Image (cartoon, rainbow, N blue to C red):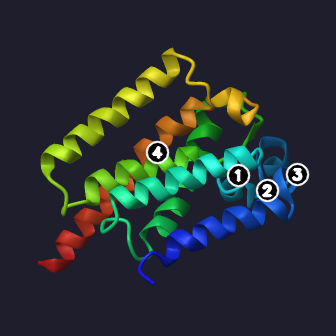
Amino acid sequence: MRYWSTWLLLMIWVTMQYIGGLAQWDYSRPAILDGQFWRVLSGHFVHLNTTHLLMNALGLLGIVSVFGEALSLARPLLLSLGIAIGISLALWLSEPQLIHYAGASGVLHGLFAAGIILAHDLSARFRLVAAAALIAKLFFETQFNTGSAELIGAPVIHAAHQWGAVWGTFLASAYAAFTALRRR
């Protein structure tokens, strides 16, 4: 099964959603300060509600369908772990007022950015357009109401999307550089 890590990631999301949910898994600054360090990672894999989970699941499937070869094998799961930790670190340092966070949308923005970098089978023009679209989305979502907050029942944490794109770009670039050096 070529996309086993994508399906595993979806199963993790569903399992966490219905076994413990937000109370046990969300990024919670007070809980992390109290020693519940798993929330640094798990907050990105649990969702506010079923609508939120479905939106992120569709996003993941869309990203993998566009950047299929680049995100096949173990990359979605491994990249998701790295991106999630990077986002949490960035949010911890840059958004001290953020008490709770849940959802994979920041990770999805990171996977999209990583797909742009790693999808060598796609044309440079397509990848450039995808990069421009990602940058435009990140800009415009902070300026205009996209309606996502109403669907999920909570404010959208735009900083998570932005940091996700940054970490996805960084990790995919590091992976591409490492792979290129190893081939030499």
Q: Residue 41 versus residue 62: which sits nearer the camera?
A: 62
**Percent x, y of residue 19:** 85, 65
In screen coordinates, is 173 left or right of 143? left
Q: Residue 109 versus residue 153: which sits nearer the camera?
A: 153
Q: Earlier in the sequence, mark 3 or mark 1?
A: 3
Q: Secondary structure at mark 1?
A: loop
Tell me which amino acid carries mark 4.
His
Tell me which amino acid carries mark 3.
Ala
Tell me which amino acid carries mark 1.
Gly
Q: Are marks 3 and 1 in contact (CB under 8 Å)?
A: no
In screen coordinates, is 133 left or right of 110? left
User: Residue 156 sits in which quadrant?
Assistant: top right
Q: Are marks 1 and 4 in contact (CB under 8 Å)?
A: no
Per the model, the C-alpha gap separating discs 1 and 4 is: 15 Å
Residue 86 showing in the rendered view: no
Q: Earlier in the sequence, mark 2 or mark 1?
A: 2
* Residue drawn at 11 percent across, 78 percent down: 184
Per the model, the C-alpha gap separating discs 2 and 3 is: 6 Å
Residue where numbered disc 4 is placed: 109
Per the model, the C-alpha gap separating discs 2 and 1 is: 6 Å
Residue where numbered disc 1 is placed: 43
Per the model, the C-alpha gap separating discs 4 and 3 is: 25 Å
Q: Secondary structure at mark 3?
A: helix
